[in-house]
Amino acid sequence: MLLPRCCWGRWLMGRRPRCSCQAPAGFDGKDGRGSRVREKPPWRVLFLGTDHFARETLRALHAARDGKEEKLIEKLEVVTVPSLSPKGLPVKQYAIQSQLPVYEWPDVGSGEYDVGVVASFGRLLSEALILKFPYGILNVHPSCLPRWRGPAPIIHTVLHGDTVTGVTIMQIRPKRFDIGPILQQETIPVPPKSTSKELEAVLSKLGANMVQCLSSSSSA
């Protein structure tokens, strides 16, 4: 039950789509758990991520939830993967410090959500899971897709001497990594002699800013 690509940004921005697209056949205004679908903010969001890049995206969503001027996100919960480190991965650390509900994959909680956001998660998502989100799941990916689809895109960018990179926000499809409609893409020059860690820091901020742009409310 994913909205057409051209409508996606308008829904996240709190505006009704002004195009001829229709919801998919069989869409009855309910989510995968049978609840009525919200048509405007505040949204209920489930975030799935692991590393430092993902943490910055989560931080941006958290800021949107706690915004003083307008309530863009009502509920924000987190899914990460198990880690051998006692402290857990950066996303888990941030979630605990910020008192956000956090689950370990494959547990995704039993709550109701409007949209999912993924960043550096590294797990394939099933169609059944995706269909639980009325507005689908967004993926914040640190490369200019389709280049460097899959894991470790930042490392590949550095190792291959790319001079341009960026961040892509796309709509996830089941069973394959980084395949789906591209909703937004921003490019930047790769700073000379950058390490993968340095480039990750740059791209993580870009990705976080892009998420904020997509979720910024505006009047129709």
Image (tube, rainbow, N blue to C red):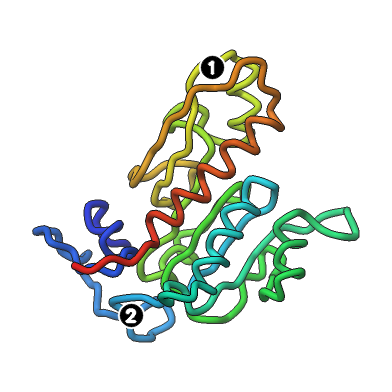
Question: In the rendering, at what x and y percent does residue 72 appear?
Answer: 42, 72
Going 65% across and 38% down the picture, which residue do you hit? Answer: 201
Q: Is residue 152 left or right of residue 39?
A: right
Q: Is residue 212 left or right of residue 109?
A: left
Going 58% across and 23% down the picture, which residue do you hit? Answer: 157
Q: Among all residues in the image, which is located at the extreme bottom?
A: 35
Vertical arrangement, residue 64 with respect to residue 29, above or below: above
- Considering only order in the chain, which callout, 2 or 1, is on the residue closer to the N terminus? 2
Label 2 is placed on what type of residue?
A: Val
* Crowd around label 1: few <14 · some 14–19 · many ≥20 (10 Å): few
Question: In the rendering, at what x and y percent does residue 92 appear?
Answer: 74, 62
Look at the numbered disc 1 and give the secondary structure of its residue. Answer: loop
Look at the numbered disc 2 and give the secondary structure of its residue. Answer: loop
Q: Among all residues in the image, which is located at the extreme right?
A: 86
Going 48% across and 64% down the picture, which residue do you hit? Answer: 116
Question: In the rendering, at what x and y percent does residue 178 appear?
Answer: 47, 41
* Crowd around label 2: few <14 · some 14–19 · many ≥20 (10 Å): some
Dots 1 and 2: beta carbons under 8 Å? no
Going 64% across and 36% down the picture, which residue do you hit? Answer: 200
Residue 37 — which label?
2
| Rendered-image quadrant of the N terminus | bottom left
Residue 148 — which label?
none
Q: Tell me the distance, in whole angstroms, between the alpha carbons under discs 1 and 2.
A: 42 Å
Q: Is residue 165 left or right of residue 201?
A: left
